[in-house]
Amino acid sequence: MNKRSRTGIAPLALALAVVLGGCSQVGDTAGAERPAPEPVVAEAAGVFADPAKNSPDTLALAATAQDWAVPIEVIDCQTPGCEGARTPGVYTPLAPSDLTEKWSICAVLPHVKDPYWVGQNAAMVSEAQRMGVALQTYEAGGYTEISNQLDQLSNCAAGGADAIIAGAVSNEALNTRIEEIAAQGIPVIDAINGVTSESVAGRALFDYCTLGGNLGRHLKETGKKVRAVWFPGPAGVGSLEQLMSCFKKESAGGDVEMLGVQYGDTGKDAQLNLIENALGAYPEMNYIIGSATTVDAAVGPLAERGLADKINTASYYFTPEVHSLLSSGKATCSSAGNDLVLSRIAVDMALRVLENKPFVGGSYVGTTANVICGRAAGKDYDNLDSLVKELNLPPEGYRPVFTVEAK
């Protein structure tokens, strides 16, 4: 009898729970059911669900502790892209003593070419080491490499993984393969980017709605005139559309207008071309909002045209480059998703499924977010010192690790 059959995981992956509201998780067609989620708590290990009650030092200490704890939002959604209710809470993981097996987890990531995904790799590796489980990681090589990631998912299953964590290169292109793997009794955890398949066992996702909404709310609350052009990334990505939709919703009622959207690859050369085009097409633009690469690419053309003091820039996620630009005054603000812990949560979710233990709050978890601004935003909004680096930036000098042995 192999480890998967001992866990009692049924041949089809479990449907996502309706979180809170008294509803338990829906079982699969074979009749197996997940235990109802543990209720989310308002405080644990000195960390509060209410972000206003947490100091940066408290969060940094809690996030790096052996028995770590972080604020989260339990999201009442079946699939990524919906705008369900968000219930704040504090996430605490299983302890190594909770495990009955030395489980083997396999993870697929889009790439490790930038600090964001290097940081996610670091978090995933750290959690596997803490729990003493095996972890094999593959990286596809980029968002165009769908066939590579499909093959890597198959390799994970064929290699005997007890559970798979999918950091997807596409919202939809992996669905059939995920469903095939789930039908084999191998749970799949949807991590960071989001897939639309409902055959995943749980989701620990970058919350585009919270990030976009917080940024929109911040710009509205400044009371300043904002005429923004968005540079979200590739067209047709549901999560990026949600990002802008939530920005628009939360900025409504303020003097904030979205002039247009410039879609394109998030490589620096592509973003530079889009920025150059937008500077000509939208002379009234005073805010560029986009990826971390966008704000980096904007530095040159804004300086060359004498517009650095007239056009602000903001990123919807945080990287070391964004931190440097905010410090130097070459970027204005950025959403900070506090989301490096998502990979730790994904590992914990996988282990909870394998051990048939309840999720924390529900099967769809995101992280709380805030807006971090540098000196270019003015002294009233400069809060760069409040950034919790441990939740937003990879460890200094860290290099990706692809194999962790079970202890």
Image (cartoon, helix red, strand yellow):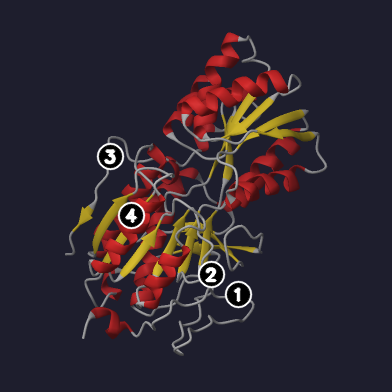
The disc, 2 or 4, on the residue closer to the chain's N-terminal end is 2
Residue displayed at 27% across by 62% down? 155
Q: Are marks 3 and 2 in contact (CB under 8 Å)?
A: no
Name the foreground residue: 143 vs 308: 143
Sequence order check, earlier mark of 1 and 2: 1
Three-letter residue code for mark 1? Leu
The residues tagged by marks 4 and 3 sit, at their Cα atoms, a distance apart of 13 Å
Q: Earlier in the sequence, mark 3 or mark 1?
A: 1
Foreground: disc 1 or disc 2:
1
Q: Is residue 45 visible?
A: no
Residue bearing the label numbered 3:
398
As drawn, the residue found furthest toward the bottom would be 31
C-alpha gap between disc 3 and disc 2: 33 Å
Q: Residues under labels 3 and 1: Cα distance?
A: 38 Å
Circle 1 residue = 20
Q: Position of residue 209 (x, y in %)?
A: 63, 51
* Spatial CA span between label 2 and label 4: 23 Å
Q: Residues within 10 Å of mark 2 (few under 14, many from 20)?
A: many
Question: Which residue corresponds to mark 2?
Answer: 40
- Quadrant of the drawing holding the N terminus: bottom left
Q: Quadrant of the C terminus?
A: bottom left
Q: Mark 1–mark 2 contact, CB under 8 Å?
A: yes
Q: Amino acid at mark 4?
A: Met
User: In the structure shown, which secondary structural element does the residue marked by tag 1 occupy?
Assistant: loop
Q: Which residue is mark 4?
A: 124
Q: Amino acid at mark 2?
A: Val
Q: Position of residue 175 (x, y in %)?
A: 47, 64
Look at the picture and state if 33 lies above or below 142: below
Q: CA distance from mark 4 to mark 1?
A: 27 Å
Name the residue: 25% across, 70% down.
103
CA distance separating discs 1 and 2: 9 Å
